[in-house]
Image (spheres, rainbow, N blue to C red):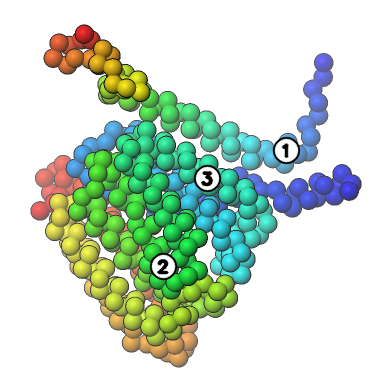
């Protein structure tokens, strides 16, 4: 093998810093950062800004680490799906073992550092979240059950609980309900995505609800989960972190969300094909806004509290 | 003594090396800042050396170590 051919191989397989960063799923990480920050700031115990910053950073790194481990395990199905084909491992820019090493290394660092920066309970909760996402969801249930999204959603729902635990050192009804918002939001969010990217999950043999139970069933599931989500997010409004601002926002957003879910439920695929899944696409976009606005309103309540305006 | 001409690999990996360097630098700064905050807040860490050592714990009532 000539020197030239070695260099060519290196160039082809060599990853840049951005490729390793992409392994951490930055878009998912932004959701983790935002919801964890809200959980931390709405808690009744003040946290020193440096401790808060470091804690959020280590929660984000932990979330990123589980993303890298997810990409390591799922590289085979990522190669089959259009949406994931350009990820660092299937595109050949990063070796799968590199992703494994990065995932394990960052997991350990983030858990230990969060335990030291905040408290042991927060560190353990982060460790459990990584374990849940990587082992329970990615390795065990994702390819086994059409309820995979429901279970995976739990892992994504933990960050506000961890943020709350950073401040308080424990769990309470408020943090459990914040968990429930993201937990109930995730299935309709992803099932609406699955409705308009229909061939992808089927090609990868992932038992998506749309494939195993049919698309009509998925439409009904979206509606049911949207109603449960509405109940949970209204319930948050009655706790110590809720208030008039949050309640107003929650009522408006949930009415919009339910209306959009009813539209999806009343349609069939023939109608959806005709307008290129317009209702499903707009539900998906609304779901992104939904979570941001809901948690933003909680933050608004906490920001108003010093002026005697937040809360009931 | 003369400097070696940089290998092509070094310029190719500059971005990656710079990224790793900056990340490690940021990590050091965060750990240092955390340490300063923890010490400033007077955490009981000085009184803990794998087992609680009361002799190292500041007695708040007396205003000094016993």
Q: Residue furthest bottom?
A: A270
* Residue B11, label in figure: 1
Q: Chain of mark 2?
A: A
Location of residue A267 in the rendering, given as x and y in whole percent from the top left corner: 37, 87
Label 3 Cα crowd, 10 Å radius (few <14 / some 14-19 / many 20+): some
Tell me if residue A4 comes above or below residue B56 in the rendering: below
Q: Position of residue B24 (x, y in %)?
A: 53, 33
Considering only order in the chain, which callout, 2 or 3, is on the residue closer to the N terminus? Answer: 3
Q: Position of residue B65 (x, y in %)?
A: 23, 10
The residue singled out by tag 2 in the image is A149
What kind of element bears circle 2? helix
Judge by depth and name the residue closer to the eye, A140 or A242.
Answer: A140
Query: Is A37 placed left or right of A307 in the picture?
Result: right
Q: Is residue B2 left or right of residue A188?
A: right
Decide if residue A28 is on the left or right side of residue A68.
left
A152 versus A218 height, above or below: above
């Amino acid at each position: 093998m000539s020197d030239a051919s070695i260099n060519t191989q290196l160039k082809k397989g060599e990853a840049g810093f951005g490729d390793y960063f992409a392994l951490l799923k930055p878009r998912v990480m932004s959701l983790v950062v935002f919801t964890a920050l809200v959980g931390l700031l709405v808690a009744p115990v003040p946290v020193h800004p440096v401790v808060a910053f470091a804690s959020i950073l280590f929660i984000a790194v932990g979330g990123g680490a589980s993303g890298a481990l997810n990409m390591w395990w799922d590289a085979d199905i990522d190669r089959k799906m259009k949406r994931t084909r350009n990820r660092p491992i299937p595109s050949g820019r990063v070796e799968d073992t590199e992703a494994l090493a990065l995932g394990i290394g960052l997991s350990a660092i983030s858990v230990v550092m969060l335990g030291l920066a905040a408290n042991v309970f927060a560190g353990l909760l982060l460790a459990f979240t990584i374990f849940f996402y990587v082992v329970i969801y990615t390795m065990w249930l994702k390819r086994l059950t059409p309820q995979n999204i429901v279970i995976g959603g739990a892992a994504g729902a933990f960050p506000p609980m961890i943020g709350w635990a950073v401040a308080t050192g424990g769990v309470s009804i408020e943090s459990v309900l914040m968990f429930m918002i993201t937990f109930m939001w995730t299935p309709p969010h992803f099932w609406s995505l699955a409705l308009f990217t229909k061939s992808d999950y089927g090609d990868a043999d992932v038992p998506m609800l749309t494939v195993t139970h049919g698309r009509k069933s998925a439409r009904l599931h979206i509606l049911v989960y949207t109603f449960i989500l509405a109940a949970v997010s209204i319930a948050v409004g009655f706790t110590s972190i809720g208030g008039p601002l949050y309640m107003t926002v929650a009522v408006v957003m949930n009415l919009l969300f339910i209306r959009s879910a009813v539209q999806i439920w009343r349609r069939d695929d023939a109608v959806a094909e005709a307008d290129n899944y317009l209702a499903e696409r707009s539900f998906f976009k609304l779901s992104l806004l939904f979570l941001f606005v809901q948690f933003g309103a909680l933050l608004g309540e906490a920001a108003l509290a010093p002026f005697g305006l937040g809360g009931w | 003594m003369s400097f070696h001409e940089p290998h092509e690999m070094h310029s190719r990996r500059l971005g990656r090396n710079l990224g790793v360097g900056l990340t490690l630098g940021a990590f050091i700064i965060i750990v240092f800042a955390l340490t300063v905050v923890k010490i400033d807040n007077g955490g009981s860490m000085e009184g803990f050396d794998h087992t609680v050592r009361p002799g190292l714990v500041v007695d708040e009532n007396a205003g000094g170590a016993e």
